[in-house]
């Protein structure tokens, strides 16, 4: 069953946690979300909204469940989903997937054979799933779009950790990982 926009009408931390174990589908490819990061639009110095007026405008202009896709360091597209709720707005960065369907196509796009390396990072994920700048502003929750989220109804144990690759607001435990999963980008310290 597709996830509707009301799933994202909450704060980014709750949405990031709740997305672990859900499925993301993009045309012929799909994967189970095993790692996310939350970014709050207020008071989070690591969020784009802290320094970029265009990100603040995006939060105002778009509905919960919209894709916020940007080019990171001029190299890789990163896919986020917008959250908007009474406890605060923000973004959830999709950091890693466990590949499920369309694996041969993912391997071709990534020029990579090893399953563990197909979607084990936010840039790898967007390449494997063919998500790019053209998807910016599209809805993850509207029917007729080429990508969406689905419920999986599988029980998922979640661990938290600090976010990766940031120096500001780096102490926040806003990275969520499926416990003991081999497909995350970087395991939590001490996790087996």
Image (spheres, rainbow, N blue to C red):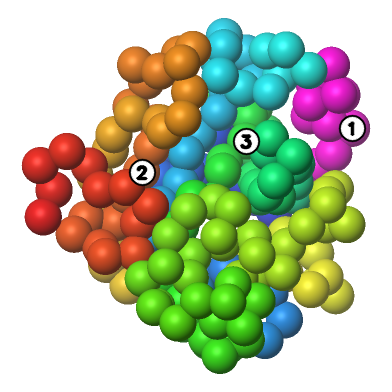
Residue at (78, 17) in percent of width and height: 52
Residue 70's quadrant in the figure? top right
Judging depth in this view, the residue of 166 and 13 nearest the camera is 166
Badge 2 marks a residue whose secondary structure is strand
Percent across and percent down for residue 127 are 65, 65
Tell me: residue 17, above or below residue 150. above
Q: Residue at x 35, y 56 (%)?
A: 184
Give the numbered dot on residue 61. 1
N-term mark: 1 or 3: 1
Please give the residue where the numbered disc 2 appears in the rendered image.
176
Mark 2 or 3, nearer chain start: 3
Check residue 54 for magenta coloring. yes
Q: Give the range drawn in magenta.
A: 53-66
Label 1 with label 3: CB-CB less than 8 Å = no
- Mark 1 vs mark 3, foreground winner is 3
Mark 2: few/some/many CA within 10 Å (<14, 14-19, 20+): many
Please tell me which residue is depicted at 33% across the width and 29% down the height of the picture: 162
Is 130 a magenta residue?
Answer: no
């Amino acid at each position: 069953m597709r996830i509707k926009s009301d799933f994202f009408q909450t704060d980014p931390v709750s949405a990031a946690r709740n997305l672990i174990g859900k499925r993301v589908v993009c045309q012929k490819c799909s994967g189970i979300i095993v790692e996310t990061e939350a970014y709050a639009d207020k008071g989070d110095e690591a969020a784009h909204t802290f320094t970029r007026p265009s990100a603040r405008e995006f939060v105002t202009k778009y509905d919960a469940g919209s894709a916020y896709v940007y080019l990171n360091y001029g190299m890789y597209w990163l896919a986020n989903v917008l959250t908007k709720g009474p406890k605060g707005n923000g973004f959830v960065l999709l950091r890693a997937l466990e590949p499920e369907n369309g694996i041969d196509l993912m391997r071709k796009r990534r020029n990579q054979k090893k399953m563990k390396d197909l979607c084990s990072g936010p840039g790898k994920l967007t390449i494997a799933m063919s998500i790019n700048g053209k998807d910016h502003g599209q809805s993850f929750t509207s029917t007729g779009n080429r990508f969406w989220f689905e419920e999986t109804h599988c029980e998922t144990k979640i661990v938290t950790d600090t976010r990766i690759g940031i120096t500001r607001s780096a102490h926040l435990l806003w990275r969520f990982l499926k416990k003991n999963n081999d497909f995350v980008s970087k395991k939590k310290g001490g996790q087996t």
